[in-house]
Amino acid sequence: MDNYGAHEAQVSEGGEADLHRHLADCTKNPGHRSFIPVDTFTLDYLPESQRDLDLCELIKCVADLTVRVSVRMTSPGRPKFWPDSTLPYPCSNKNGGHLRTGSGKIRQVLKYEHTACRCDKCKQSEKLSDVWWVIGIQTATHVVYDDVEAETSNIRLFYDKKSSPLFVLDNVRVWSISVESCFEMRHLQ
């Protein structure tokens, strides 16, 4: 497929780069210089013919569904090549632990009531919560390939500003995978 090899994720041996500090000097994509942080986005950034308050609010709401996915392990099950090609699969040459980050989006939020929560924190607690949530995240398979990688992953919500509160989801599991899909999407919980 045409999209094989067209992927993006940050791989780091020394930790993640500071998103806010490196935004201005990013040389990878010249368009990053005109990046508009979501908290400063207003009607004025839309073309005059599209300046609608509802559209502006929709853009801000959809931006809030974006998450940062951090993975600390590369699975031995990760393929060496994209399907039916000789193009190397991202990070197939990485072994073991290293930090890889990418983005994803919230696709589903499910609330469970009157059943015992299954998270690690509740399992170690004397009192299990009887109200809990499962949040479905969609990301690319080159970011999280399988449960081996998912188990070392966490999901950061609302990371747009340095002052954003730390809100991290863990206890990540894979729901489904499609490497063949042109979007290489994966659902996480």
Image (spheres, rainbow, N blue to C red):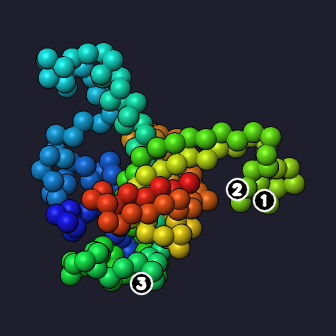
Side of 1 relative to 59 (left or right) = left
Q: Is mark 1 on a helix, strand or loop?
A: helix
Give 90 or 27, whichever is nearer the viewer. Answer: 90
Please name the residue that numbered disc 1 is placed on: 123
Disc 2 or 3, which lies upstream in sequence?
A: 3
Picture coordinates of residue 145, whole percent (x, y): 43, 69
* Res 15 visible: no
What is the distance, in whole Å, between disc 3 and disc 1 at their CAs? 31 Å
Side of 113 relative to 178 (left or right) = right
Q: Residue furthest right?
A: 126
Side of 111 relative to 59 (left or right) = right
| Residue type for callout 1 | Lys
Residue found at x 27% / y 59%: 182
Picture coordinates of residue 181, whole percent (x, y): 31, 60
What is the distance, in whole Å, between disc 2 and disc 3 at their CAs? 28 Å
Residue 78 position (above or below residue 53): below
The quarter of the picture where the N terminus appears is bottom left
Residue found at x 14% / y 23%: 47
Mark number, residue 95: 3
The quarter of the picture where the C terminus appears is bottom right
Please name the residue that numbered disc 2 is placed on: 119
Q: What element carries label 2?
A: loop
| Residue type for callout 2 | Cys
Q: How crowded is mark 1: few (under 14 residues within 10 Å), some or many (20 or more)?
A: few
Residue found at x 61% / y 47%: 134
Give 25 or 137, whichever is nearer the viewer. Answer: 137
Picture coordinates of residue 106, whole percent (x, y): 46, 44
Q: Is mark 3 on a helix, strand or loop?
A: loop
What is the distance, in whole Å, between disc 2 and disc 1 at their CAs? 6 Å
Q: Would you say the residues marked 3 and 1 are in contact, meaning their CB atoms lie under 8 Å apart? A: no
Q: Would you say the residues marked 2 and 3 are in contact, meaning their CB atoms lie under 8 Å apart? A: no
* Res 178 visible: yes
